[in-house]
Image (cartoon, rainbow, N blue to C red):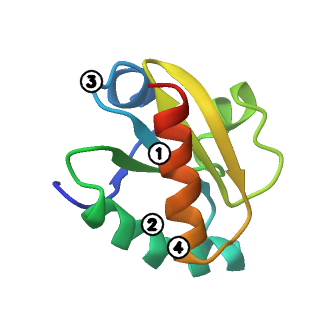
Amino acid sequence: MAGKPFETTDAKFENEVLKSQTPVVVDFWATWCGPCRMIAPIVEELAGELEGRVGFAKLDVDHNPGTAMKYNVMSIPTLGVFKDGKLVDRIIGYMPKAQLKQKIETALTSVA
């Protein structure tokens, strides 16, 4: 779905994120996590604003622990910025939209 975060799983992660032609920001989250619920609408807005430049995925760590463990996600929310199949930056915790957007854009340009 264009301009919206998509749900990914351990099984689909490699194809949907690592093999993506465009960078992907993965929101590692869980339903019980308050800060995850706070950052979710910001992630949705950024998915629309950055459409075409970067994709956004959501990965529920309770239902998909393998990927979270592989990338050492120790606290949530964690946003992983993936480019060319590699984790290039990690953003941990809640932050305001402008700050989050700046961090994502910096991560994307620093490895361009």
**Secondary element at image label 2:** helix
Q: Is residue 32 visible?
A: no
Q: In the rendered view, would you say 73 is above or below 43?
A: above
User: Of label 4 and label 3, which has the lower sequence position?
Assistant: 3
The quadrant of the picture occupied by the N terminus is bottom left
Tag 1 near tag 3, CB within 8 Å:
no
Image position, residue 10 (x, y; %): 51, 31
Q: Of circles 4 and 1, which is in front?
A: 4
Q: Residues within 10 Å of mark 4 (few under 14, many from 20)?
A: few
Outermost left residue: 2
Q: What is the CA distance from the residue labelled 2 to the residue labelled 4?
A: 11 Å
The three-letter amino acid code for the residue at tag 4 is Ala
Q: State the mark number for residue 21.
A: 3
Report the side of 4 relative to 68 (left or right).
left
Vertical placement of residue 5 versus 99, above or below: above
| Residue 43: numbered disc | 2
- The residue that mark 1 highlights is 25
Disc 2 and disc 4 in contact, CB within 8 angstroms: no
Identify the mark at residue 98; answer none if there is no mark: 4
Circle 3: residue type = Gln
